[in-house]
Amino acid sequence: MAAVWQQVLAVDARYAAYRTPRWPQFRTQYVRRRSQLLREQAQGGALEGSTRRWYLRVRTRLLAQRYGALSEQSSCRAHSSSALRASRTTLDRMEDFEDDPRVARGHRRSLSRGSHPGVSRGVPDERPPGVVPTPLAEASRAMAGDTTLSENYAFAGVYHVFDQHTDSAVPKVQFAHDDRHLLACCSLDGTISVCRLAPGPPAVLRVLRGHGGGVADFAWSLSNDVLVSASLDGTLRLWAPADGRCIRRVPDPDGAALLCCAFQPLNNNLTVVGSARHMVRVVNISTGKPARGGAGRLPGRVLALCFDAPGRVLWAGDDRGSVSSFLCDPGTGRLTKASRVVVQAGGSITSLSARAWASREAPDPSLLVNACPDRLLLFRVVEEEGSGAPGLRLRRSFPTRHREQSLRSCFCPLMSFRQGACVVTGSEDACVHFFDVGRTARATVNTLQGHGGAVLAVAFNCDESLLASSDATGTVIVWRRQHA
């Protein structure tokens, strides 16, 4: 019944802003202490399941009577009224899951350190044909052992809560490459914070200041010695995260707000940036000048960018619901328009993530897409007949709560040969959702609750031991995985 305690934490987190409107720093302290107490209660198992569910219902009613019903989310600082309903819906589903032990185990272990170890499920299946194992794949397989997918992505609780961006949305969080404990997050307050989770107590190492508008996106270089950020003030900035210096400032030629950015994976001297004036540009960060031939135009504002694993194809999503692809020369940065697919007519594409292969059942290149409204889409990347241009074939669609915010999702980073694979997404119901790409029914593997607003971004560290999630109220929660 740890999931019930998690729902209690979620309800308290959503009302935290109402308790101390004049002292926002106390919100995080309350959530941390509440999480600790609930974790101890779940570990002790002092109360029966029916008593815990009754407590959740009573506490929800008392909070609603004391502070009023949560209002509809109309801005980054508002709370969603669907959040309270989502908690109730999850509670009702929990009662159904208790009749199905295959599903109940994954949910009961969501946030409890005192959960019992998982039961062995037998020998993992054979490797898929045509897929060559890598050291990361073997490491993931060893980590997973004989656990089911639900057990492997159960979480032990809140590792830490950061609140340095209180009351300003945090649109992205990202761990440094091959570093378990170095985390960065950007905020609409115009800053980027670099945090260290270990060794020692978690702390904010430094805050990068200089942008005159909100920071919409950022990216780590492969060596982690440089951060690039895209801001609504119309500038691209290059930072040295080790000491917080701004190395270079590159204004947009059109003076447009910059909404997304990404390093060229084969040549970190090149950065791609997307603007509110529908432009995709490649910038040489050493000179601060655009690459010759490195520009393309989309039908709408460019909201998302990502490269495929080989670094040859650039994917770009816009607010007209289309995903465009460009062939990118990693040496010169020249872009060649390849294809355009309307994924969500009348909607917007807020996140793109590419993967060499999604799972043992899907060994082809894949693209994960957050499409507003209310869809998380997994595509298979194919070569179009005749042109050879990259095309998209829909493999799976998952329901999400996505109406107003720019939400992000990601693949779980370690590729293993066990059956099934996970994708993780934020949601406007204030939850983090895990979906199994291989299931045709009951695709939800786990749901994490504890945020007080729409969850905008999620990110795993390199070994999947920690998951970071950020929300529209400025809170960043780092979750510890059960097997970490």
Image: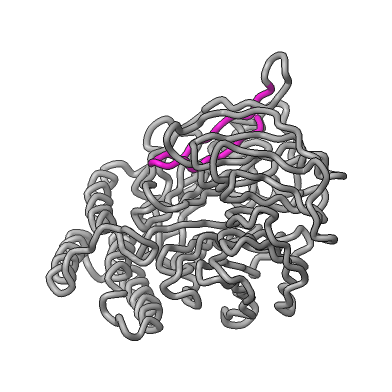
Which residue is at the far top?
Answer: 386
Q: Is residue 143 above or below residue 315?
A: below
Q: In this view, does 379 lie above or below 201?
A: above
Left or right, residue 469 beside residue 136: left
Find residue 259 and report its horizontal and vertical position in percent. 58, 54
Left or right, residue 391 beside residue 241: left
Q: Residue at left 38%, top 56%?
A: 431
Residue 314 seen in the figure:
yes
Q: Residue at left 23%, top 54%?
A: 85
Left or right, residue 284 beside residue 196: right
**Which quarter of the rendered picture does the C terminus lie within?**
bottom right
Magenta-drawn segment: 364-383
Find residue 293 and report its horizontal and vertical position in percent. 80, 41
Q: Examine the image and state in which quarter residue 330 appears.
A: top right
Taken as a whole, is the magenta stretch helix, strand or loop? Answer: strand
Based on the picture, tell me whether residue 438 belongs to the magenta stretch. no
Find residue 402 and report its horizontal and vertical position in percent. 39, 47
Which residue is at the far right?
Answer: 331
Q: Examine the image and state in which quarter residue 10 appears.
A: bottom left
User: How is colour applied across the structure in the image?
Assistant: one colour
Residue 421 seen in the figure:
no
Q: In this view, does 343 lie above or below 309?
A: above
**Which quarter of the rendered picture does the N terminus lie within?**
bottom left
Find residue 48 and report its horizontal and vertical position in percent. 21, 63
Q: Residue at left 69%, top 43%?
A: 307
Q: Examine the image and state in which quarter residue 393 appears.
A: top right
Based on the picture, tell me whether residue 365 belongs to the magenta stretch. yes
Q: Which of the two residues, 329 or 425, is positioned nearer the viewer here? A: 329
